[in-house]
Amino acid sequence: MPVVPAHYLGRIAELLARGDRVILGLTGAPGAGKSSLAAALHALFPSESQVVPMDGFHLANVELARLNLRHCKGAPQTFDSGGYVELLKRLRKQKMGEVIYAPEFRRDLEEPIAGAIPVFSETQLIITEGNYLLLSDGHWSEIASLLDESWYVDIEQSLRIERLTKRHEQFGKPHAHALQWIKQTDEPNARLIESTRERATLIFDWNAAKVTV
């Protein structure tokens, strides 16, 4: 598990000190380490937090095929953005004793699984992570106002590409296919995501000496 710099943990403590439900959004380009950061934060605040990824709102492969979008799976138009927004709205207003079920994306199946993540009303910190939390068009534009804070996960470009390549190979893509997918799909998405960087509450850097707001 990667080590989260202490000053970011102080930021989480400040959010939790409010006493009410907190939704923290983690965003950044593919391969930046959003899932790793979400898992690390959850491990540090296990009783207070749950992770609810945006990736559960991937459209199913059969629907991507119907829409002729299989070639760009992972782009903004291949998600149920409206469904994700509605989930965040429900999580903001969750009633005591209510369980809200969120979907999960299974990389081994390359499919979303409905109702896989039970979110409990007593969970104070919801950590949601995904590529497009700060886009300004369509349903995506509603997300920022539903988050208490948004952190943009920054990383050195060559390391990000290396991680992406290994991820694609791990889940079955030959090396050449992985590189081609990164070039044609991941990197156009990365440039779009990077254009939203300035909308984040802060820039998260694993090696930073201080928070960049």
Image: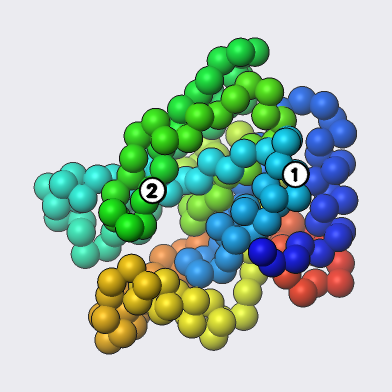
Residue occupying image coordinates x 75% and y 44%:
45
> How many residues crowd around disc 2 within 10 Å: few (fewer than 14), some, or many (20 or more)?
many
Where in the figure is residue 123, as x and y percent of width and height?
A: 67, 29
Q: Is residue 68 above or below residue 100?
A: below
Q: Is residue 186 above or below residue 12?
A: below
Residue occupying image coordinates x 21% and y 50%:
61
Where in the figure is residue 10, as x and y percent of width and height?
A: 87, 51
Residue occupying image coordinates x 37% and y 72%:
170
Quadrant into which the N terminus falls: bottom right
Query: What's the distance in space between the residues labelled 2 and 1, CA to CA?
Result: 23 Å
Question: What secondary structure is marked by label 2?
Answer: strand
Question: What secondary structure is marked by label 1?
Answer: loop
Where in the figure is residue 122, as x and y percent of width and height?
A: 68, 23
Reading the image, the residue beneath label 1 is 45
> How many residues crowd around disc 1 within 10 Å: few (fewer than 14), some, or many (20 or more)?
some
Reading the image, the residue beneath label 2 is 105
Is 3 left or right of 150, judged from the image as shown?
right
Is 89 left or right of 12, judged from the image as shown?
left
User: From the viewer's perspective, is the residue at label 2 or at label 1 nearer?
Assistant: 1
Quadrant into which the C terminus falls: bottom right
Is 146 left or right of 20, judged from the image as shown?
left
Res 32 visible: yes
Amino acid bearing label 1: Phe
Query: Quadrant of residue 5 in the image?
Result: bottom right
Where in the figure is residue 190, as x and y percent of width and height?
A: 47, 68
Residue occupying image coordinates x 63% and y 74%:
155
Sequence order check, earlier mark of 2 and 1: 1
Applied colour scheme: rainbow
In the image, 101 versus 181, the foreground residue is: 101
Res 196 visible: no
